Amino acid sequence: MKKSYEKTKELNDMTQGIKLSSLKKKGSKYIYRGQLWSLNKPKRSTAKGKKMMVLASKTVNGEKRAKLIHFGAKGYGHNYSKEAKKNYLTRSAGIRNKQGKLTKDDPWSANYWARKILWPAKKKATGPRIT
C-alpha cells in the first residue's frame, strides 16, 4: 500500500502536472513514462477507448509543467460533416471544469485538444464517420 506522502505527490502530479525540469531530455524531446515526447504534439493513444494523447505543457505558478492528456473516444467519428462539426464545436464550447472555467482554452483539457486536432474550426470536414 502506498504511503500518504506518495499518494499526495501522485494526486498533486495529476492536478498540477509534472515539472518539465524533472524530466530527462533527449535533444528537443522529453522522456516521460518510457516514451519520447515532443511537447504539445499529439500521437496515437495507448489508453483503451481513446484515439490520441499529448504531453501538454503550460506555466503554473511561474513554472513550466506538463501533463499527459488522452482525448477522442474510439468508435466515434470526428469531423465527418459540416453539420456534425458545427454541432460539436457549439456543444463543446460550453464545457466547464470543476472550477467553472471554460475548458476550450485550457491546454490541459481533453476538450481543448479534441477541438484543436479532431474538430479544427478552420479546416474542411473530412474525417472518418467511425474510428
Image: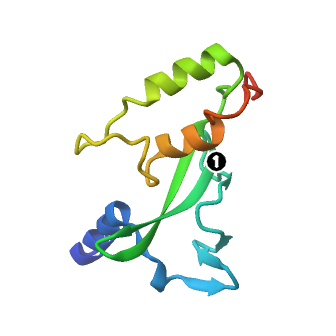
Q: Residue furthest top?
A: 83
Based on the displayed image, in which of its 4 quarters is residue 28 positioned?
Answer: bottom right
Residue at image coords 34%, 40%: 102
In this picture the colour scheme is rainbow
Residue at image coords 39%, 42%: 103
Vertical arrangement, residue 100 with respect to residue 43, above or below: above
Q: Nearer the viewer, residue 7 or 68?
A: 68
Which quadrant: the C terminus? top right
Residue at image coords 55%, 46%: 113
Residue at image coords 65%, 34%: 122
Give coordinates of residue 22: x percent, y percent.
Answer: 46, 84
Horizontal side of residue 95 vs 41, given as left or right: left
Vertical arrangement, residue 14 with respect to residue 75, above or below: below
Give coordinates of residue 57: x percent, y percent.
Answer: 49, 65
Q: Which residue is mark 1?
A: 52
Based on the displayed image, in which of its 4 quarters is residue 4 positioned?
Answer: bottom left
Q: Amino acid at mark 1?
A: Met
Give coordinates of residue 72: x percent, y percent.
Answer: 59, 38
Q: Nearer the viewer, residue 64 or 110?
A: 64
Horizontal side of residue 74 vs 92, given as left or right: right
- Label count reads 1
Which quadrant: the N terminus? bottom left
Horizontal side of residue 34 vs 15, given as left or right: right
Q: Residue furthest front?
A: 122
Q: Classify 10 Å Cα crowding around label 1: few (below 14), some (14-19), many (20 and above).
A: many
Task: Tell me the SS state at disc 1.
Answer: strand
Give coordinates of residue 86: x percent, y percent.
Answer: 57, 20
Vertical arrangement, residue 69 with respect to residue 74, above or below: below
